[in-house]
Image (cartoon, helix red, strand yellow):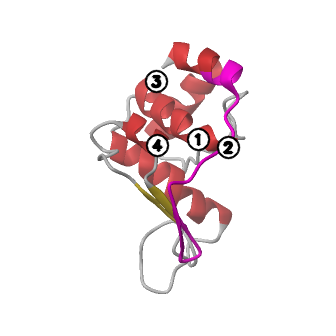
């Protein structure tokens, strides 16, 4: 973990485009739990919440070469959104429980996922 943090901090200071995602840096992070990676990136790399969210959305899309379709809320782009009850800029943990999800413009109210309680409990200890 120490090398991941120092590498990410170095990339940030050297202005190297950096993306984050559930399969890129943290082991045992289930896809429903990407909010943890965004939170931990902000916490351990010392970046503001807004920068962590940008890195996980627009920056990832730019790196993947799909920013013309996803990564930001703009006319003509896919409508893939989390709808939250609380502001994630104030607390990235607010990403944990979306009120709704929009995927390709289709609304999914009260989304639910099958959680892995053992992994959740372990990861909760470091948050």
Tag of residue 84: none
**Disc 2 element:** helix
- Using the image, determine if residue 122 lies above or below residue 34: above
Tag of residue 97: 4
- Using the image, determine if residue 97 lies above or below residue 100: above
Between marks 2 and 1, how big is the CA–CA gap? 6 Å
Disc 4 crowd, CA 10 A, few/some/many (<14, 14-19, 20+): some
Quadrant position of residue 64: bottom right
Q: Is residue 106 magenta?
A: yes
First of labels 4, 3 by sequence position: 3
Task: Write the residue at 62% across / 60% down.
Answer: 63
**Disc 3 element:** helix
Extent of the magenta region = 102-120
The residue where tag 3 is placed is: 44
Between marks 1 and 3, how big is the CA–CA gap? 15 Å
Between marks 3 and 2, how big is the CA–CA gap? 20 Å
Query: Residue 11, how many percent across, how many down?
Result: 54, 38
The residue where tag 1 is placed is: 34
The residue where tag 2 is placed is: 31
Q: Is residue 32 left or right of residue 102?
A: right
């Amino acid at each position: 973990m120490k090398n991941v943090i120092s590498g990410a901090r170095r990339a940030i200071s050297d202005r190297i485009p950096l993306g984050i995602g559930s399969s890129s840096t943290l082991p045992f992070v289930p896809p429903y739990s990407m909010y943890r990676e965004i939170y931990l990136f902000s916490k351990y790399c010392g970046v503001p919440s807004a920068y962590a969210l940008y890195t996980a959305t627009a920056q990832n899309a730019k790196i993947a070469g799909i920013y013309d379709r996803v990564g930001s809320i703009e006319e003509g782009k896919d409508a893939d959104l989390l709808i939250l009850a609380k502001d994630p800029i104030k607390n990235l943990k607010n990403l944990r429980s979306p009120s709704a999800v929009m995927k390709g413009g289709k609304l999914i109210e009260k989304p639910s996922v099958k959680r892995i309680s053992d992994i959740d409990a372990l990861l909760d200890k470091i948050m």
